């Protein structure tokens, strides 16, 4: 691997490792506390839907953090914004650990989400700044793998912490994760040279410039449908994350040991998925990979409907095709969406992450609504509807494109 932007303290692999660790440690906040949700619900005496506001607020405000981070980094540089995001995340995680009620927890989760939004957006931009060509594909695959590992491994670690303490201990651990992410961020040299930054005189002007960049991007053929697919593919995945503890720990009454084993299987599929994309992308067009992945998500909806209620193992196995497909579509989407001139990478990254977070926030709400007969049926319906939405998006705006990452790959 070769760095496009020199680093004073880090070589190519160590730089990538630091970017991965910053992303991984911060992204653990998404759902490390998920195994504690049933016990938190009993402690606070609230409904599952109300408690899940802690997750909804996180993603909704995280989307705002994403929007702010891109323009700020285009104007000020990547490193200052990443460092600020890590500091904000660390302080608010400690606040979550000390929260006396659900409302306070929601408030601190919102602040935590601002730091999360900044870091997750700019980790992608850091990689895009530092690598190019085949190295960029490799680095992006690694980054997306870590992004998937975080939400998958976090509940696994959460159950370990719960075996020694209560849910507050989870947020104490996240506080230390924030410190670790901050240390990694401080080791990195700025990746966006002053000559490549926006010429705006203020962050407000940079936001306006980004908005103009977004307006240009959405007029590009295929950009908006690709963003839509990136957002929609998150819906079944995070709906699954939102209900998994209720299904396994409450509905099927499995113990923490069984829960960990089932989640370990889920983790392994998440880890493998981006590497399946890397393997497949060298042998077929991205459009072929995308169509196969969308089909796999549709199959998942049918499997959940037919076999999901049969037991915890059947429920998990039924969702595996969608888990694999989500891990394939994410890196593919970012390779295509971030193939932009340097002055529009921040706008493309912000808009892509904003859309992803908005869809994710919606997923955490609709998955726990009371109108579902049960969470498994609800997840099956969500998965099938998401598949149909992606089919429409592909048919309307992406048919005929190779989707190999070239900015003008319009002919298949």
Image (cartoon, grey):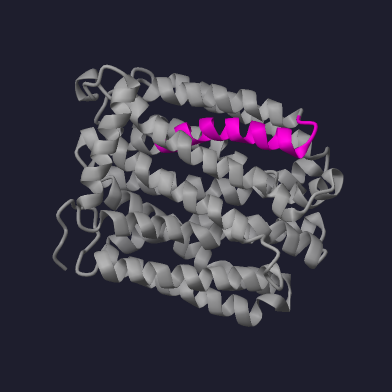
Please give the range of residues in magenta.
99-121
Magenta stretch secondary structure, dominant = helix
21 on left or right of 104: left
Answer whether residue 411 is magenta in the image. no
Name the spot of residue 250 as percent of width and height, x first.
80, 62
**Residue located 37% across and 58% down the image:** 228
**Residue located 64% across and 55% down the image:** 242
In the depicted structure, whether residue 277 falls above or below residue 2: below
Name the spot of residue 305 as percent of width and height, x first.
61, 79
Name the spot of residue 165 as percent of width and height, x first.
83, 37
Answer whether residue 101 is magenta in the image. yes
Name the spot of residue 244 as percent of width and height, x first.
68, 60
> Observer-nearest residue: 400 or 64?
64
Q: Quadrant of residue 161?
A: top right
In the depicted structure, whether residue 255 falls above or below residue 95: below
Q: Quadrant of residue 16?
A: top left
Residue 266 in sight? no
Quadrant where the N terminus sits is: top left
234 on left or right of 36: left
94 on left or right of 342: right
> Observer-nearest residue: 199 or 247?
199
Quadrant where the C terminus sits is: bottom left
């Amino acid at each position: 691997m070769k760095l496009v932007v020199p680093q004073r303290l880090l070589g190519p692999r160590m730089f990538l490792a630091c970017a991965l660790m910053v992303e991984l440690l911060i992204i653990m906040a998404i759902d490390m506390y998920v195994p504690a949700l049933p016990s938190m619900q009993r402690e606070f005496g609230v409904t599952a839907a109300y408690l899940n506001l802690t997750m909804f607020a996180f993603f909704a405000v995280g989307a705002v953090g994403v929007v702010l981070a891109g323009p700020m980094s285009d104007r000020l540089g990547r490193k200052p914004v990443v460092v600020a995001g890590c500091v904000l995340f660390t302080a608010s995680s400690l606040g979550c650990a000390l929260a006396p009620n659900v409302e306070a927890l929601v408030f601190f989760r919102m602040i935590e989400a601002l730091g999360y939004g900044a870091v997750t957006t700019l980790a992608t931009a850091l990689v895009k700044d530092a690598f190019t060509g085949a190295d960029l594909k490799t680095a992006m695959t690694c980054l997306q793998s870590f992004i998937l590992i975080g939400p998958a491994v976090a509940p696994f670690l959460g159950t370990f912490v719960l075996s020694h303490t209560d849910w507050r201990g989870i947020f104490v651990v996240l506080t230390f994760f924030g410190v670790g992410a901050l240390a990694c961020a401080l080791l990195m040299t700025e990746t966006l040279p002053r000559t490549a930054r926006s010429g705006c005189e203020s962050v407000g002007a940079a936001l306006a410039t980004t908005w103009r960049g977004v307006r240009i991007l959405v007029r590009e053929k295929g950009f908006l449908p690709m963003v839509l697919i990136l957002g929609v593919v998150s819906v079944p995945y995070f709906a699954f994350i939102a209900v998994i503890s209720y299904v396994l720990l409450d509905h099927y009454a499995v113990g923490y040991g069984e829960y960990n084993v089932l989640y370990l299987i889920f983790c392994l599929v998440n880890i493998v998925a981006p590497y399946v994309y890397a393997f497949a992308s060298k042998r077929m067009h991205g459009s072929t990979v995308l169509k196969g992945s969308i089909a796999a998500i549709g199959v998942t909806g049918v499997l959940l409907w037919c076999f999901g209620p049969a037991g915890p193992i059947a429920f998990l196995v039924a969702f595996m095709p969608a888990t694999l497909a989500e891990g394939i579509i994410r890196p593919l989407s970012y390779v295509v969406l971030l193939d932009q001139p340097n002055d529009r990478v921040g706008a493309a990254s912000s808009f892509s992450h904003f859309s992803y977070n908005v869809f994710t926030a919606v997923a955490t709400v609709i998955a726990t609504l009371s109108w579902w007969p049960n969470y498994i049926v609800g997840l099956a319906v969500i998965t099938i509807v998401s598949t149909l939405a992606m089919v429409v998006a592909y048919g309307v705006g992406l048919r005929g494109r190779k989707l190999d990452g070239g900015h003008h790959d319009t002919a298949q």
